[in-house]
Image: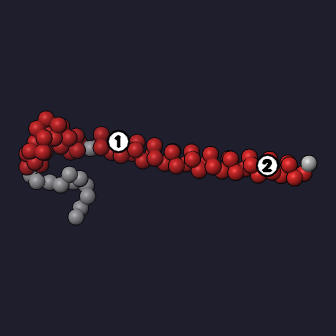
Amino acid sequence: MLESAVELLGGLFFGTVVLLIGFCVVGSMVAALRAVSRECASSPVRQEALAAHRTAGFAGTLLARQARGGQPMNPARKA
């Protein structure tokens, strides 16, 4: 009786740990994708470059960069 109770609790614990790890992995992936999506959508420089790229392809992206004076894509980052 005691052995079966211990085995049941061990199985429940193992199943719970597996589910917890799975939820953590999936949650981390969702959070990372939302952060990347939010950062891309909130940057006006990237919006401008993306719009130029969609309308005129790679040449449009280069023209948009030249219109900004050749600034890097992320002006907040200092090299």
What is the spatial separation of the Cα atoms under label 2 and label 1, in whole angstroms? 42 Å
What's the image's color scheme? secondary structure
Residue found farthest to the top: 55
- Other residues around mark 1 within 10 Å, as few (<14) / some (14–19) / many (≥20): few
Is residue 37 at all visible to an observer of this figure? yes
At 51% across and 45% down in the image, what residue appears? 26
Which residue is more in the foreground, 52 or 21?
Answer: 21
Q: Earlier in the sequence, mark 2 or mark 1?
A: 2
- Other residues around mark 2 within 10 Å, as few (<14) / some (14–19) / many (≥20): few
Is residue 68 at all visible to an observer of this figure? no
Q: Position of residue 67 (x, y in %)?
A: 8, 46
Q: Which residue is mark 2?
A: 9
At 21% across and 45% down in the image, what residue appears? 45
Q: Position of residue 43 (x, y in %)?
A: 27, 44
Give the mark toward the camera: 2 or 1. Answer: 2
Q: Which residue is mark 1?
A: 37
> What's the mark number on residue 59?
none
At 20% across and 51% down in the image, what residue appears? 73
Q: Amino acid at mark 1?
A: Ser
Dot 2 falls on a residue whose secondary structure is helix
Which quadrant holds residue 39? top left
In the image, taking residue 70 as reference, residue 78 lies left or right, namely right
In the image, taking residue 30 as reference, residue 3 lies left or right, namely right
Q: Amino acid at mark 2?
A: Leu
Q: Position of residue 38 (x, y in %)?
A: 35, 41
| Quarter containing the C terminus | bottom left
**Count of number-bearing discs:** 2
Dot 1 falls on a residue whose secondary structure is helix
Q: Position of residue 20 (x, y in %)?
A: 62, 47
